[in-house]
Amino acid sequence: MAFLDSERTDIRRHCGYPAQGTGADGFSGWRYYQAFGLLEYRIQRLGGDEEAVVRTYLATLAGLETAIPNASATLDTDAASVWSRNPNELRDRARLFDDWRRRLCGFLGIPPGPSLNDGGLRMVV
């Protein structure tokens, strides 16, 4: 069974690649990124078992992604009774989320996209 459009969007997003858009005009988009083209090729040609693995990744990533903004609910509390907040919770959750995003890229056999590039710029000529 092929991926739904929403699943394909989530795969691209979690792998760190920008939105694809609907038009082919201009000099931007996946057609000008070799890795993005490889991602699209892989998404379209995965077997049933492979799609099931990717869907498992998507479910895990959805939970991890939701946990990051939810962690902000306790940012104003350093200690309450015997409970003490982890001051690094937000950073730890973001790192865990990005780790799972990189695992998805590894499973798909593609390099992490620009938003997973750890802030550095890479240029291939």
Image (cartoon, rainbow, N blue to C red):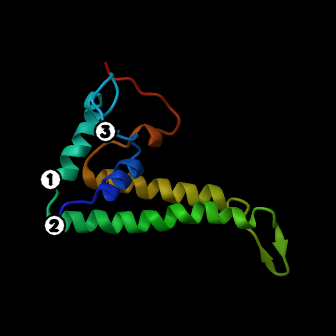
**Residue carrying label 3:** 22
Closer-to-camera residue (114/12): 12
Query: Which quarter of the figure is the C terminus placed in?
Result: top left
Q: What is the three-letter code of the residue carrying label 1?
A: Arg
**Residue carrying label 1:** 45
The percent coordinates of residue 89 (x first, y second) are 66, 62
Q: What is the three-letter code of the residue carrying label 3?
A: Thr
Which residue is rendered at x = 69% and y = 61% of the image?
72
Mark 1 secondary-structure assignment: helix
- How far apart are labels 3 and 1 at the CA level? 21 Å
Query: Which quarter of the figure is the N terminus placed in?
Result: bottom left
Q: How many marks?
A: 3
First in residue order: circle 3 vs circle 2: 3
Closer-to-camera residue (90/27): 27
Quarter of the image where one finds residue 20 = top left
**Is 51 left or right of 102, judged from the image as shown?**
left
- How far apart are labels 3 and 2 at the CA level? 27 Å
**Residue carrying label 2:** 48
Which residue is rendered at x = 25% and y = 48% of the image?
109
Closer-to-camera residue (26/93): 26
Q: Are marks 3 and 1 in contact (CB under 8 Å)?
A: no
Closer-to-camera residue (9/56): 9
Above or below 18: residue 1: below
First in residue order: circle 3 vs circle 1: 3
Above or below 52: residue 44: above
